[in-house]
């Protein structure tokens, strides 16, 4: 059975959705499942790779932006994705919120989260308007939906009354060969120097800089505890996204320029080392479809503090400390509790590592395989 998979996010995005798509394709047992995969990428090839795991990538002659305008903004039924790849796939899996036109008899759509509905003010207005238009339309057209978490599945049911038998949950995972505790002193020192951290103990936060990640409250919470931890710094890694000006303004207003570090985008090959060296990993997001960095940090032995909202408990299991992400006081108390209690840190590291071990990509692809079978059965 032929299956066509939209691999665009894995090529165009550097984290989150792109990593999930990349890892699911890389670990999926295509031959064992009896599926012949073809990978589709919206946009011209440019300098991107031509193959993935021996599978050819099929690009469009137009830029990704042009394809988006044609397919989603103009709602054109043409061109079909099969025009760029050849063949007649039985299944088409659109992996990133929107469903391009296809003739496949079974069309599957992954919806990662509904943040654009739940936290409209934290996104760019133009993007919110676009998503509010195209995602409901794509959900209605799809034969079957995949969600990153049970929370997102519930959101889909609540928002658009999607029947439970039309949704499968395929959660994210972590690769223990990539994300594991780094203890080599030279590696730790080299990465510290690369990102300007030096020898100071640090709290690590990591994500694209944008309001939903709640870094302003994290900075305020850190300001509440700095006097108890005079050597500690806060490292917020990630590229600048949108509406991040308030974050930098708050750091300046609190006089924290020397205690809060913004090293920018962190290379994939440095992530495990940064997680490993951190005193703790803070992920106080207001809403997530899953929360992949939580698992990555746990696999590297970092104690994790995160919010008690959305899907974050699904990502963190029993290994994280949960706080009200909308309360600066609770975030500060949680940070202080972890930092001041060596026994708690040891217990959290053990629990986090145990949880991450259970959440490998092999588990995720088994869930995806089951979703494909459910989807195919639903149209026959």
Image (tube, helix red, strand yellow):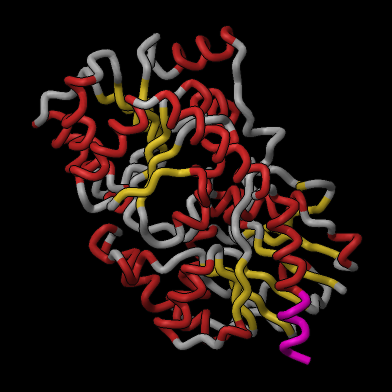
Rendered position, 125 above or below 302 = below
Rendered position, 12 above or below 93 = above
- Give the image quarter of residue 3: bottom right
Which quadrant of the rendered structure holds the C terminus? bottom right
Q: Within the magenta stretch, is there residue 379?
A: yes
**Residue under the image location 24 percent in, 37 percent down:** 332
Q: Residue pushed farthest left?
A: 253
Q: Position of residue 250 (x, y in %)?
A: 14, 36
53, 305: nearer the viewer = 305
Rendered position, 135 above or below 196 = below
Q: Position of residue 372 (x, y in %)?
A: 74, 73
Tell me where the magenta segment starts and ends, as one range: 373-380
Q: Residue pushed farthest bottom?
A: 380
Rendered position, 363 above or below 321 = below
152, 313: nearer the viewer = 313
Prevailing SS of the magenta stretch: helix
Decide if residue 118 is on the left or right side of residue 320.
left
Res 208 seen here: yes
Q: Position of residue 171 (x, y in %)?
A: 60, 59
- Give the image quarter of residue 172: bottom right
**Residue under the image location 65 percent in, 57 percent down:** 7
Decide if residue 269 is on the left or right side of residue 235.
right
**Residue under the image location 72 percent in, 55 percent down:** 363
**Residue under the image location 71 percent in, 72 percent down:** 371
Decide if residue 31 is on the left or right side of residue 119.
right
Res 245 seen here: no
Q: Within the magenta stretch, is there residue 322?
A: no
Which quadrant of the rendered structure holds the N terminus? bottom right
Q: Position of residue 306 (x, y in %)?
A: 38, 46
136, 113: nearer the viewer = 113
């Amino acid at each position: 059975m032929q299956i066509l998979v939209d691999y665009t996010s894995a090529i165009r995005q550097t984290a989150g959705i792109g990593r999930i798509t990349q890892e699911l394709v890389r670990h999926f047992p295509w031959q064992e499942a009896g599926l012949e995969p073809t990978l589709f990428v919206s946009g011209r090839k440019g300098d991107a790779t031509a193959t993935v795991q021996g599978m050819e990538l099929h690009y469009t002659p137009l830029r990704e932006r042009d394809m988006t305008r044609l397919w989603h903004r103009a709602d054109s039924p043409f061109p079909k994705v099969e025009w760029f790849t050849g063949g007649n796939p039985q299944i088409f899996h659109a992996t990133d919120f929107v469903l391009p036109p296809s003739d496949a008899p079974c069309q599957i759509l992954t919806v990662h989260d509904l943040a654009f509905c739940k936290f409209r003010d934290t996104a760019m207005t133009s993007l919110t308007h676009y998503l509010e238009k195209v995602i409901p339309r794509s959900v209605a057209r799809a034969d079957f939906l995949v969600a990153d978490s049970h929370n997102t599945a519930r959101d889909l049911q609540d928002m658009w009354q999607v029947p439970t038998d039309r949704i499968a949950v395929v959660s994210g995972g972590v690769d223990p060969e990539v994300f594991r505790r780094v203890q080599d002193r030279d590696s730790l020192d080299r990465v510290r120097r690369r990102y300007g951290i030096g020898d100071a103990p640090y709290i690590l936060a990591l994500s694209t800089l944008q309001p939903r990640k709640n870094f302003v409250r994290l900075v305020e919470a850190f300001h509440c505890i700095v006097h108890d931890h005079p050597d500690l710094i806060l490292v917020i890694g990630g590229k600048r996204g949108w509406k991040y000006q308030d974050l930098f303004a708050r750091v300046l207003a609190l006089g924290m320029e020397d205690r809060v570090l913004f090293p920018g985008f962190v290379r994939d090959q440095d992530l495990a080392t940064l997680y490993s060296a951190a005193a703790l990993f803070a992920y106080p997001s207001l809403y997530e479809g899953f929360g992949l960095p939580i698992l990555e940090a746990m696999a590297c032995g970092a104690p994790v503090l995160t919010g008690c909202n959305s899907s974050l408990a699904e990502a963190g299991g029993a290994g994280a400390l949960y706080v009200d992400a909308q309360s600066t006081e609770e975030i500060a108390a949680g940070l202080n509790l972890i930092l001041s209690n060596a026994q708690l840190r040891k217990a959290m590291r053990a629990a986090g590592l145990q949880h991450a071990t259970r959440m490998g990509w092999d588990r995720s692809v088994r869930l995806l395989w089951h979703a494909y079978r459910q989807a195919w059965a639903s149209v026959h």
